[in-house]
Image (tube, coloured by chain):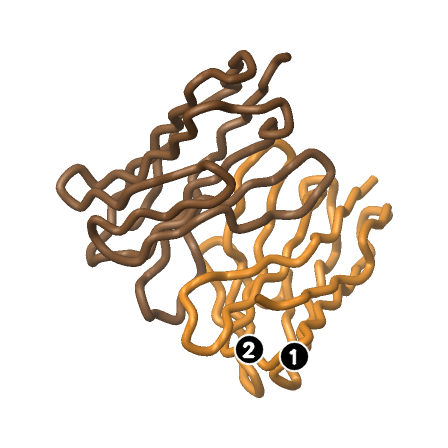
Amino acid sequence: GDSVTQMEGPVTLSEEAFLTINCTYTATGYPSLFWYVQYPGEGLQLLLKATKADDKGSNKGFEATYRKETTSFHLEKGSVQVSDSAVYFCAQGVRGGADGLTFGKGTHLIIQP
Amino acid sequence: SAVISQKPSRDICQRGTSLTIQCQVDSQVTMMFWYRQQPGQSLTLIATANQGSEATYESGFVIDKFPISRPNLTFSTLTVSNMSPEDSSIYLCSVRLRGKETQYFGPGTRLLVL
């Protein structure tokens, strides 16, 4: 079945470091791909998305490119801040479908000053 | 986007009792879903709430344990029945807007079963 695999944390970085969180998916079709973020004590928020191959989603300095050839949607940011500390979830959904999302296990990111 | 509210925001319940969680959204949405997030874990889809008909449950979840209602386009309830400590989780409602791919999530209901 459809699944999402993302690197497990916690990932600890210093402020201004470069961030990559890997995410790969398996799907029978061509899914839409999402990154959600959960800040401490808060609900789940959409960070960015891409709905077709080679699309790049971006928001708040974060980027991810939908790579069909490698079935990946890695999250990157050039210079992280302490305020980026959160849990990041990669997810996929059937494009145009009526189903819920399939989530990865989440990556806990800790940014140290 | 959509503004989604859930009630209660948290509760502590005794084993064997039931709790009904409400989800209200401020706009008419096409799809409503219920997820569970167990402590330190990812989100797992429980079911799709269908308006005017029975919910569609994912493998491992059954109607007797998690009855769901959706009487209209903006409101749904999830009941966690005959609770045990293993049901301690965050329960989240999510919605998909008409013509949109994105799902938006409510703030969640944090449930602790003693």
Q: Which tint was used for chain B?
A: orange
Whether residue A51 sits left or right of residue A102 in the image: it is left
Q: Are marks 2 and 1 in contact (CB under 8 Å)?
A: yes
| Number of the label disc, if any, that sits on residue B74 | 1
Mark 2: amino acid? Val
What amino acid type should be assigned to the residue bearing mark 1? Thr
Quadrant of the image for the C terminus of chain A?
top right
Label 2 marks a residue whose chain is B
Considering the numbered disc 2 on the image, is that residue within a helix, a strand or a loop? Answer: loop
**Residue A72 location, x and y as percent?**
26, 38
Residue at 21 percent across and 49 percent down: it is: A54
* Residue at the spot 75% in from the left edge and 67% down from the top edge: B22
- Considering the numbered disc 1 on the image, is that residue within a helix, a strand or a loop? loop
CA gap, disc 2 to disc 1?
Answer: 7 Å
Give the mark nearer the N terminus: 2 vs 1.
Answer: 2
Rendered colour, chain A: brown
Q: Position of residue B94 (x, y in %)?
A: 58, 62
Question: Measured from the top left, where is residue B41 in percent x and y?
Answer: 56, 35
